[in-house]
Amino acid sequence: MHPILNDIRLISFDLDGTLVDSVPDLAAAVDKVLEEIPLPPAGEDKVSRWVGNGSLKLVERALTDALGSSPSQQHLEQGHSRFLYHYGQDVGSRTRLFPGVVEALEGLSAQGLHLTLVTNKPQAFIQPLLASLGLEGYFALCLGGDALPQKKPDPAPLLHVADHFGLSPSACLMVGDSRHDVAAGRAAGFRTLAVPYGYNHGEPVSDSRPDALVDSLAELVAPAANPFSARSRA
Ligand SMILES: O=C(O)COP(=O)(O)O
Ligand SMILES: [Mg+2]
């Protein structure tokens, strides 16, 4: 068990960039929107830097980049609605779980922790994506970016989750890949843990100073090192 879990009763996981590498399917949908306009495709590298503030922001960043200036409100709304259509057609065929995720979810559920999902991805895509990856059984509550008026980095979704389970935020941990997860967690009074392998607008997530950082979520459930075995080898 990782020491950050001491006295923790609930974990809120971020989805994109933390549990799943979803950029291939997100970029495919963004590029279909651009192609319809028509504008040149963005590709996965750029899209990985634009993910994190929900689908409307993703489309706004893609249109601004391709047009060289901000889109009109009407073009943004049309582009967003086409994005929701295209992404909804295929949320999961190229999306993969990051290493260590299933191991962590299995181990943490076995310890009786409440596992929840707090993502800025629209609510409608969560269940189909979890189902396509075999993850649908693990989470007691899933909150999408459009479930409440506020999304991360606002603490409201995390406070909602803690309140739903009648828990103090100090008994809760936010696990994510971006500065928005760390900021939301800190503002909500959750402990924060980050992974460095996801999407954080091209910057190291360590810059946002989470309480802990792990290279793989499997480290959350790894057995604590046994000091006697180390001594006996010496
Ligand atoms: O849809 C997004 O922008 C990112 O979603 P996330 O909060 O799961 O990283
Ligand atoms: Mg994320």
Image (cartoon, rainbow, N blue to C red):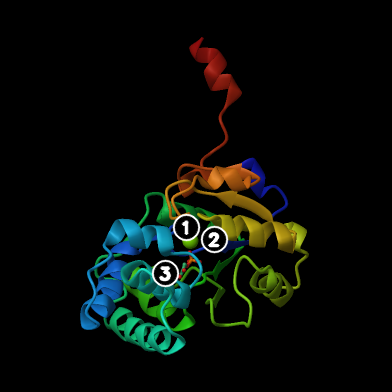
Residue found 33% across the figure and 72% down from its top = 67
Which residue in the protein does label 2 denote?
109
Q: Mark 3 — residue?
A: 61
Q: Nearer the viewer, residue 43 or 151?
A: 43
Q: Residues within 10 Å of mark 1 (few under 14, many from 20)?
A: few
| 173 displayed left or right of 189 | left
The reply to whether the C-beta atoms of the residues labelled 3 and 1 are less than 8 Å apart is no
> Which mark sits nearer the N-terminus, 2 or 3?
3
From mark 1 to mark 2, how far is it between C-alphas?
A: 5 Å
Q: Secondary structure at mark 3?
A: helix
- Tell me the mark number nearer the camera, choosing from 3 and 1: 3
In the image, farthest residue toward the top:
234
Q: Secondary structure at mark 2?
A: helix
Q: Amino acid at mark 3?
A: Arg
- Residue 234 rendering spot, x and y as whole percentages: 51, 9
Q: Label 2 sits on what residue type?
A: Ser
